[in-house]
Image (cartoon, grey):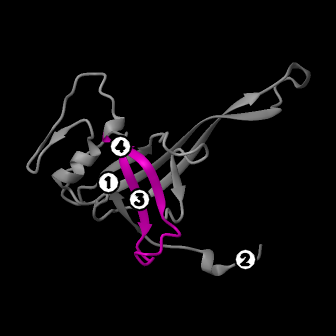
Amino acid sequence: MAADITNVKLGVCSVKFNNVDLGHTKGGVVVTYTPEYHDVTVDKYGNTVVEKVLIGEKLTAKVPLAESTIANMAVAIPAGTSDTDNITVGKQAGELMAQYAHALVLHPIANEVSDLDEDVNFYKALVSSEIALNYTFDGERVMEVTFEALLDETKSSGAYLGLFGDST
């Protein structure tokens, strides 16, 4: 493969959750894919790994939301109860969270709306992180959230979590 300078990309992305644009971000969005493996060893080779077996995968997106709205807080706190004016928190233990998962799409804003070649799609995403609201005199109130992809059994093996590229 020959080097191609046009493959060097810069720029920010738009963030849509459940088909709703979450607005401005500050600090950059970071997508992370983390495979988890079991190391297979045999007596003959001691602790030398002879094979790796995939036992899990995690797909996450860290998104620093710059727009401090009740709607964004409702996304950040999926176990909360919200309306247009407020969000309340505090549920009993045992709440199943997949019901709050929706599609998350990251789209480079340098690309035309119809150019989906570099999109990142999470089929079922849910904010799984703690949130912190910073009230300071010298900085924006950025709410950093981490979306985590949940397994989507309607997809096939190898495509349970998401898709990098054109989803059409």
How far apart are the two marked residues, 3 and 1, measured between alpha carbons?
9 Å
Q: For the N terminus, which image quadrant?
A: bottom right
- Residue at position x 45%, y 72% from top? 11
Q: Considering only vertical position in the picture, is 122 above or below 3? A: above
Percent of width and height locating residue 139: 25, 60
Determine if the magenta segment contains residue 106: yes
How far apart are the two marked residues, 4 and 3, measured between alpha carbons?
13 Å
According to the image, label 1 marks what residue? Answer: 18
According to the image, label 2 marks what residue? Answer: 3
According to the image, label 3 marks what residue? Answer: 105
As shown in the figure, which amino acid type bears the numbered disc 1? Asn
The answer to whether the residues at label 2 and label 1 have Cβ atoms under 8 Å apart is no
Q: Considering only vertical position in the picture, is 11 above or below 147? A: below
Lower position in the chain sequence, tag 2 or tag 3: 2
- Residue at position x 16%, y 51% from top? 70
Magenta segment, which residues? 100-126
Frontmost of labels 2 and 4 is 4
As shown in the figure, which amino acid type bears the numbered disc 4? Ala
Say few, some or many: other residues with alpha carbon within 10 Å of mark 2 (under 14 / 14 to 19 / 20 or more): few
Lower position in the chain sequence, tag 2 or tag 4: 2
**Taking 22 as reference, is 137 left or right?**
left
Which of the pair 47/164 is nearer the observer? 164
What residue occupies the far right of the structure in this picture? 44
**Taking 91 as reference, is 105 left or right?**
right
Say few, some or many: other residues with alpha carbon within 10 Å of mark 4 (under 14 / 14 to 19 / 20 or more): many
Which of the pair 91/20 is nearer the observer? 20
According to the image, label 4 marks what residue? Answer: 101
